[in-house]
Every structure is written in C-alpha cells, then in structure tokens.
Image: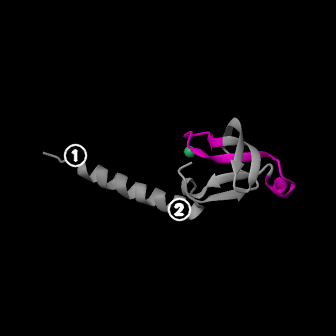
Amino acid sequence: MSGGTGYLFKDAINLALAHVKHVHFTSGEYIVADTSCIQCNTKLGWKYLYAFRDYNARKVGMFCLCRADLLTYKEKKTRKQKLRRKNQSVKAQFRIVPW
Ligand SMILES: [Zn+2]
C-alpha cells in the first residue's frame, strides 16, 4: 500500500490475505487482514474481518484498497499502449541494418 486514498470494495479477486491484526483507526477498532496481489505481491490494503463498534459492522467482509495501486480498465489500456509504443522504439533502436 503506497499511501493515498483508500476505497472500500464489497469484493475483490486475485488477492492473498495475510497478517491478521488488531488495529485502531480514527473510525474505530477492527480486526483486519493485510491483502496483497497474488501475482506481484504488492500490498494493496486490508480486509475487515471484525469491527468492535456496531456502527462499523457494515465494513466487515469488505476490502479497503489503495486507489494508487489499482488501475481502471481505461488506465490499463493506456498503460498497455504506452508500453507497446516504448517496446517499438526499443526495437527500432536495435534494428539490424543490412550490410
Ligand atoms: Zn500485482
């Protein structure tokens, strides 16, 4: 988790859960599990496993994920295009020139 804004998600996939811990946030006290990407291991946030205050109960089972570490479909597409353009220019640099 690289800091920045966190968003609540009802569900998330391709995440691994680890390190169950007792935390004190400004909104209250919780038991959470750290979550990370199963592919690149980036820490993305946590899953709420238990809330000590009734008014926080709606968060239980939800994921808080850092927005900066996630891509929207549009961002993913743009990133792929940029990467493709970059790869093309690298290829151009190493183009084999005939004698
Ligand atoms: Zn990843």
Coloring scheme of the render?
one colour
Task: Give coordinates of residue 89: x percent, y percent.
Answer: 30, 55
Question: Where ligand 1 lies, by quadrant?
Answer: top right
Which residue appears at 53% of the width and 50% of the height?
2
- Res. 83 image quadrant: bottom left
Which residue appears at 58% of the width and 40% of the height?
39
Q: What element carries label 1?
A: loop
Give me the C-alpha separation between circle 1 and circle 2. Answer: 34 Å
Q: Is residue 55 magenta?
A: yes
Task: Give coordinates of residue 69: x percent, y percent.
Answer: 55, 53
For disc 1, the marked residue is: 96
**Of all residues shown, which one is farthest toward the right?**
54
**Of all residues shown, which one is farthest toward the top?**
19
In the displayed structure, does residue 62 sit left or right of residue 37?
right
For disc 2, the marked residue is: 75
In the displayed structure, does residue 79 sit left or right of residue 5?
left
Numbered range of the magenta stretch: 35-59
Q: Is residue 73 magenta?
A: no
- Cβ of mark 2 under 8 Å from ligand 1: the answer is no
In the displayed structure, does residue 95 sit left or right of residue 99?
right
Return the residue nearer the eye: 39 or 99.
39
Mark 1 belongs to which amino acid?
A: Ile
Name the image quarter holding the C terminus. top left
Which residue appears at 66% of the width and 44% of the height?
14
